[in-house]
Amino acid sequence: MKFTHPLLPGTLLRRYKRFLADVRLDSGGELTVHCANPGAMLGCAEPGWRVMVSDSLNPARRLRHTLELVHNGAGWIGVNPVLANAVAEEGIRAGMVPELAGYDRMDREVRHGESTRFDFLLSRGGERCFVEVKSVTLVGTDGLSAFPDAVTSRGVKHIRELLSARAAGDRAVLLFVVQRRDGLKGFRAAGEIDPLYAQTLRDANAQGLEVHAHWAETGLDGIDLTSLKLPLCL
């Protein structure tokens, strides 16, 4: 997934009120930019770190710019979770996730039940596979990539709905898109942050929910899902 326009370099001054960040651009001046990440952004939002922001080129938008990347000294971290679905879609279509290869059709934002939409539905003939995508930006003190970085009742709901789809005879897959390079030795649930989510994920995996975590290489031109699959340490 390539960025539509070149990103603007700067320095993070602060991230606050969940969806706001102040940035000093290298070209001069300070901006308040949109931060699309609703999580805690632990280890991803230290004042003084290098950042890259995108420009929507829409002067009518209240916050015209968006925080896209943060550099923690080890590499760039993709902190805009809105992009994870596009990254996943391109990666699946390119065969980066062999377990999801061979389907004839891919539909987005597919309704399941009365109140849930899964990110993708893959199908061939009468076979269906529901896929939910999560963006991972947290690395724990153990060096493992981890999710979530904040308590997420919505995430628990998604796991339970995926299990419901599996019980109805469909495949159910949870795909974690790891957007940093310093936690590639494995992936786990962040039980120290959300014990309910961690236990729900472990139980669901034991009941047949398929869990995959792939590294998405993050650079100044774009973010690309790779075939590098992280070992699960749920």
Image: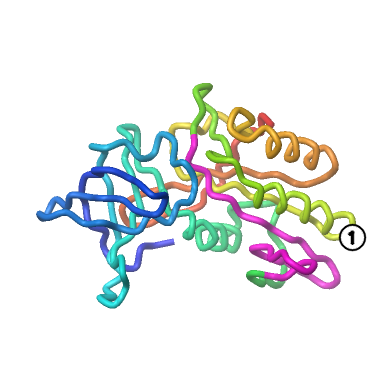
Give 152 or 216, whichever is nearer the viewer.
152
Taking the spot 29% from the left edge, 77% from the top edge, the residue there is 60
Q: In which quarter of the image is the C terminus?
A: top right
Which residue lies most toward the front here?
A: 17
Query: Residue 154 vs residue 218: left or right?
Result: right
Rendered location of residue 41, percent (x, y): 44, 41
Which residue lies most toward the top here?
A: 142
The image quadrant of residue 164 is bottom right
Give 116 or 143, whichever is nearer the viewer.
116
Give 72 or 122, whichever is nearer the viewer.
72
Rendered location of residue 152, percent (x, y): 62, 45
Q: The residue under label 1 is which amino acid type? A: Ala
Query: Residue 60 vs residue 117: left or right?
Result: left
Query: Residue 172 vs residue 195: left or right?
Result: right
Taking the spot 50% from the left edge, 58% from the top edge, the residue there is 87
Rendered location of residue 171, percent (x, y): 80, 56
Indicate yes or no whether the magenta region holds residue 183. no
Residue segment shown in magenta? 110-138
Q: Residues within 10 Å of mark 1 (few under 14, many from 20)?
A: few
Taking the spot 66% from the left edge, 72% from the top edge, the residue there is 107
Q: How many labels does the image show?
A: 1
Which residue lies most toward the left here?
A: 28
Taking the spot 64% from the left edge, 63% from the top edge, the residue there is 119
Give 163 or 103, whichever is nearer the viewer.
163
Residue occupied by mark 1: 168
